[in-house]
Image (tube, rainbow, N blue to C red):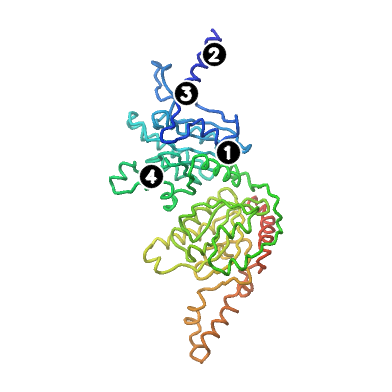
Amino acid sequence: MNIQKRKEFIQAECDKLRTTVSLKGGRLSVQDKLAAFFDENTFVESGAFVSENTSFSGAAERGAEGVVTGYGAVNGRLVFCCVQDYSRDCGALSLAGAGKIAAAYEAAARNGAPIVTVYDSDGAKLTDGVNAVAAFGKVLKAAADVKGIVPQIAVVTGVCSGGMAAVAENADVVVMGGKNARLSLSPASVLKTAGADEDTAGGDYAKKAGLASLACETEEEAFQQVKNILDYLPSNCEQGEVGVATGDDPNRAVAGLEDMVLSESYSGAQLVAQLADDGKFIELSDSFGEEFSVGFASIDGFACGILAGNPQQGSQITSAGAKKCADFIRLCDSFALPVVTLCDCDGYSAEDEVKHPELMRSLAELSMAYAQTESPMITAIVGRLTGSAFGVLGSKAVGADMVFALPTAVISPMNAEAAVEFMLNDKLAEGLSKEELLEKWETEISSPIYAAKEGYVDYICQPHELRARLAAALNMLGMKAAF
């Protein structure tokens, strides 16, 4: 055997493998995407020479598949990756390419590491015939098999349609990046024929529809956001709590919190930033179910998922908001992330139920998500918690481990005005003024003291100490998921 000739042949094949670089439409090349995501010189490609043609004839001429798979370090931690390569047949997916992707998912699960899949393809390799359809099924099964075992993040930088759109939506987090990002079941040409406008399937559209967690202006920004999100997620479902480096004092007093909450026009993201370490909060799906803000943050170094009421966008639960929260709680529970709920909600509206009958099912899914969660659950009632909201938003009744309330919190089966008219009608008939009854209801019945006496609130804390109370509770519950 001529070892030197073999080495030269292999090196020549390696050089040919990915020399084509496509910047069509402002795309990053696969090499640039990998460099933007992985720590320098850590990415190792797997299955590099796999191709769809399995016959011996013409083996040396077979080109690379339209997907690059492998692993490397992201902020020093092992992460697997699949990147569709638009420079190879426009990223067309073949059965061989699907096999590479499935192998990457399996390797991620075996090694207990996250997997990130980057979508940029015009679709299936139609010359494969029925194998082209089978390829989508193979990838979908691979993704489904590791659901809840390791974190899955989808990054859409180009077209992601048909079967691969279903795979992307199976991910725990979906991030869209760059002007070429499109997420839809039908190809753009079909959508246009059906009357869709040019923004359909783009980043903003996907966020408003609840299909994408984040939409970034550039691909580089999308990869940075994925790296930030991974900092708050464990590598797998067995790892346990995640520590986030911070120099923030857990007992830091929170100034101005009471005025913010009483204004009833604050955003959930503003509230979380006041309580989180260093004011950092990665909000997800901010254009869908806007009455809630959900996302990742840390408190005293404990990574957690936070759900906060967003009065700036509405105070009543919608079907979209309930679904967003339920999905996020299940994500947190899959990886033992503590769930912190900051309540300021007025139940739901009958008018919304008339327009969206699915509200009933969405509320049921939300309450079920809380009730089935085994992760630590901490709730702080910072504003209102009235009507059906009490039963579905992280109360003791659905399994919260610790519940705090501010002195100004309102906890009631209905708002004060309706309660006086409905429940104290006899008092009105006796000549007591409505104003007196309203004051009595607000001072006594709907105060957090009443709920605390019934065991539904553990502690009524001053606004400035809420961060410290949350930090202490997270420390106390640190081992809950292990027992």
Which of the marked residues, 4 or 3, is nearer the chain's N terminus?
A: 3
Which amino acid type is marked by label 3? Thr
Judge whether residue 149 can be spotted in this image: no
| Residue 363 percent across, percent down from the top left | 46, 62
Foreground of the two, 192 or 351? 192
- Residue drawn 58% across the image and 44% down it: 228
- Residue drawn 48% across the image and 30% down it: 68
- Residue receiving disc 4: 184
* Residue 7 image label: 2
- Residue receiving disc 1: 113
* Residue 87 image label: none
Foreground of the two, 462 or 167? 462
Which amino acid type is marked by label 4? Ser
| Residue 265 percent across, percent down from the top left | 53, 66
Which amino acid type is marked by label 2? Lys
Q: How crowded is mark 1: few (under 14 residues within 10 Å), some or many (20 or more)?
A: many
